[in-house]
């Protein structure tokens, strides 16, 4: 499966998103906060594009960065959202929040979306008692996600939860025990989703290119 393994710091600087929002990185050492301008030799003096297309493209790129998506995955999620009833932008975010890797991150069981995906791909997690190793697996509201007993004892899992213990967990996710897993309580409301994007711009971007 294709994955985005590019440098996160550079992309965050280009899009103006603090790296600490994407990972558990210390904000005091966040390169984006220390150098709040695009990377490159002329980054500090570069002229920022303000065209309508550039603004919409930027929001779409931000969405992909938050969820660690490739373009094909992002477009497929939009197409599914556009066919569903309700506000397309909100439905799009709800679909992405229902991904197994996204929920693992929201519950503070991983320090970044990449680590959450790694836990899933290595088969550390079970959904309602069944092993799940596909990061894009759609978790249904009411379902429980738990670490396998053996993997729960791994140092990387325990260290991850320890680092993220003070993380604010959204109301639509409930942490089980001392980091044994999570319960997906319900679909989130838009204002509960901790993703700073202008979803109407993303909808317009894909609508214009369909």
Image (tube, rainbow, N blue to C red):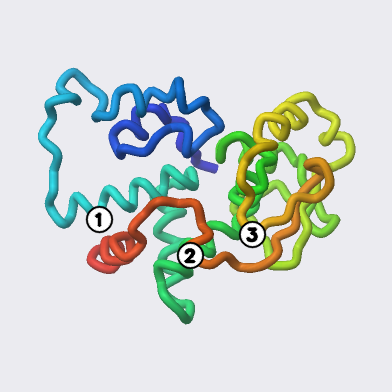
Do the residues bearing badges 2 and 1 touch, measured as CB atoms within 8 Å?
no
Quadrant of image for the C terminus: bottom left
Tell me if residue 148 comes above or below residue 99 in the rendering.
Answer: above
Quadrant housing residue 35:
top left
Disc 2 to disc 1, how far (Cα)? 19 Å
Describe residue 69's horizontal placement relative to residue 205 as left or right.
right
Disc 3 to disc 1, how far (Cα)? 29 Å
Q: Earlier in the sequence, mark 3 or mark 1?
A: 1
Tell me where residue 45 appears, x and y as whole percent.
Answer: 12, 26
> Which residue position holds label 1?
56
Quadrant housing residue 38:
top left
Do the residues bearing badges 2 and 3 touch, measured as CB atoms within 8 Å?
no
Instruction: Please tell me which residue is depicted at 77% across the width and 40% down the height of the picture.
Output: 124
Q: Which mark is on residue 171? A: 3
Total numbered badges shown on the rendered structure: 3
Tell me where residue 137 appears, x and y as whole percent.
Answer: 64, 56
> Which residue position holds label 2?
190
Quadrant housing residue 46:
top left
Instruction: Please tell me which residue is depicted at 53% across the width and 60% down the height of the picture.
Output: 192
């Amino acid at each position: 499966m294709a994955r985005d393994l590019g440098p996160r710091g550079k992309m965050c600087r280009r899009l103006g998103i603090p790296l600490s929002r994407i990972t558990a990185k210390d904000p005091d050492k966040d390169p984006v906060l220390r150098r709040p301008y695009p990377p490159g030799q002329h980054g500090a003096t570069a002229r920022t594009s303000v065209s309508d297309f550039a603004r919409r493209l930027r929001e779409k790129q931000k969405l992909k960065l938050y969820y660690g998506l490739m373009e094909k995955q992002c477009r497929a999620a939009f197409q599914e959202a556009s066919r569903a009833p309700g506000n397309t932008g909100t439905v799009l975010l709800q679909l992405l929040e229902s991904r197994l890797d996204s929920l693992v991150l929201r519950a503070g069981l991983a320090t970044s979306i990449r680590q959450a995906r790694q836990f899933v791909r290595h088969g550390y997690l079970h959904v309602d008692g069944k092993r799940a190793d596909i990061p894009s697996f759609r978790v249904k509201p009411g379902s429980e996600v738990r670490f396998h007993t053996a993997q729960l004892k791994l140092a990387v899992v325990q260290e991850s939860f320890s680092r993220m213990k003070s993380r604010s967990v959204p109301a639509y996710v409930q942490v089980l025990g001392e980091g044994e897993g999570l319960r997906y309580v319900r679909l989130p409301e838009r204002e509960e989703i901790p993703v700073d994007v202008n979803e109407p711009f993303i909808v317009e971007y894909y609508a214009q290119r369909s």
